Image: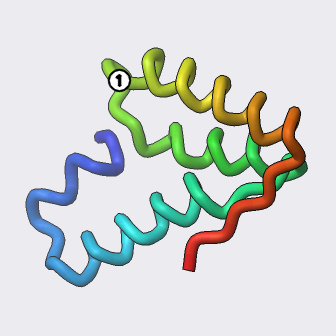
Amino acid sequence: MHPLRCLRTADASYIEQLGLSFVALRLNVTPETVDAQHQQLLRYVLPASQNSLKVQLAEDAKRIKDNNVNSTFI
């Protein structure tokens, strides 16, 4: 079973924490960590959506590396 399928029975607090975790994986990045962060995030994406998100994440990772971007979400 895909990890997100269990959300139908999860309580609101769990879903909120999971959402914050996804935001952190997406926005807390450096040129050194972006690839690992994006790979971790993709583990939670439904297979039907993975290809389009991979393209977007690859573009973002390139921009982060090319411009030496450091991003922190608090």
Q: In this figure, which colouring scheme has been used for the structure?
A: rainbow
Task: State the residue in front, 29 or 14.
Answer: 29
Image quarter in which the N terminus is found: top left
> Which quadrant would the C terminus be assigned to in this image?
bottom right
Q: Residues within 10 Å of mark 1 (few under 14, many from 20)?
A: few
- Residue 6, by quadrant, is bottom left
Q: Judge from the rendering whether residue 65 lies leftward or rightward of residue 47; answer left or right.
A: right
Q: How many marks?
A: 1
Q: Position of residue 14 (x, y in %)?
A: 28, 77
The residue that appears at 34% across and 32% down in the rendered structure is 46
Query: Residue at image x 64%, y 39%?
Result: 39
Circle 1 residue: 49
Q: Position of residue 8 (x, y in %)?
A: 10, 58
The answer to which image quadrant residue 64 occupies is top right
* Rendered residue at 32%/19% (across/down): 48
Instruction: Identify which residue is drawn at 17% across, 70% down.
Output: 10
Estimate the x, y position of residue 41 in percent, counting from the top left: 53, 46
Q: Identify whether 7 is placed above or below 60.
A: below
Q: Amino acid at mark 1?
A: Ser
Q: SS of the residue at dot 1? A: helix
Left or right of 68 in this view: 40: left
- Asked if 70 appears above or below 62 in the picture, the reply is below
Q: Position of residue 53 (x, y in %)?
A: 47, 26
Q: Which residue is more in the foreground, 44 or 26?
A: 26
Is 35 above or below relative to 73? above
In the rendered image, the vertical position of residue 66 relative to residue 4, given as above or below: above
